[in-house]
Amino acid sequence: MGIGDDASPNIYMIVPGGGLSRDCSRWVACKPGFFLHVRVLSRLFRRLFINGLMALHRAGKLAFFGELTGLTDASAFATWLALFRKSEWVVYSKPPFGGPEAVLAYLSRYTHRIAISNSRLVSTDADTVAFRWKDYRIKRGDRMKVMRLDTHEFFRRFLIHVFPDGFHRIRHDGLLASATRKPNIAKIRTLLGSDVVAQEDTSTSDTIPLTLREPCPDCGGQMHIIETFRRGQVPRSRAPPMKQAA
């Protein structure tokens, strides 16, 4: 999602196709071509959808017209929804066309990049911000268009992508939990007979950090190189927040 979309960020979850046994002696893979039971998935979606409708009704965000005006009453609306709780819902899921690699590449554009890059900005002033966006409804030709937003509206959409203090963009759980990540990955690779060699961790305390000869222009202290990247490459590290003066 980009600045041009007036919507909240989505939450994505990557689930491995298996797991370690209780004694960690073997890898238990899921059935070929099987991810989630369709009946479990349909009932979960049904519950979440109906609960969402109930929440919207309690918040007064649903409008009813004509013969449905009686559903404004909470008890009448609950009775009407009860019928849908008993019916089977149909859901459909399928593997991605480009395979799992395409899914990871798609998600990486959201987890390791900001909402909008500087190259997409066209012009800006005190009242308006203009930027380029891609219209996916156009199948052929130039799909890039220019959108102009009020400055306050632009920042409102931009701040949707900024996480509050204490929140993390990426969270790891289960096999990739921080406390047991390395031994779990090493164990899984051994059980699967993977030829992938884990990269050595170069962030140990014995590693001597590279420094710059020029001092910091702000405090005068020595500056350390935290990352080196090529032109056009997205940096993996982020600069720490600036300390506010007392």
Image: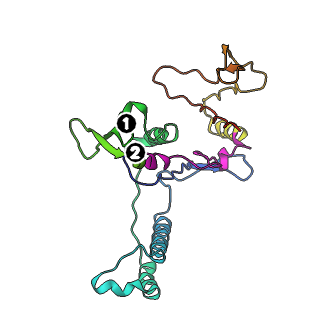
The answer to whether the residue labelled 2 contacts the one labelled 1, judged by CB atoms less than 8 Å apart, is yes
| 41 or 163, nearer to the observer | 163
Tell me the kind of residue under disc 2: Thr
Residue 152 inside the magenta-drawn segment = no
| 155 or 196, nearer to the observer | 155
Residue 124 is marked as 1
Tell which residue pokes out farthest to the top in this image.
213
> Does dot 1 land on a helix, a strand or a loop?
strand
| 1 or 181, nearer to the observer | 1
| Residue 92, quarter of picture | bottom left
- Asked whether residue 19 is in view, the answer is yes
Left or right of 122: which side holds 152?
right
| 216 or 23, nearer to the observer | 216
The span picked out in magenta is: 154-181
Left or right of 29: which side holds 65?
left
Q: Residue at x 55, y 49 (%)?
A: 17
> Does dot 2 land on a helix, a strand or a loop?
helix
Q: Main secondary structure of the magenta part?
A: loop
Task: Name the residue that disc number 2 marks.
Answer: 151
> Disc 2 versus disc 1: distance between alpha carbons?
8 Å
Q: Residue at x 50, y 19 (%)?
A: 230
Residue 30 is marked as none
Image mark count: 2
The quadrant in which the C terminus is found is top right
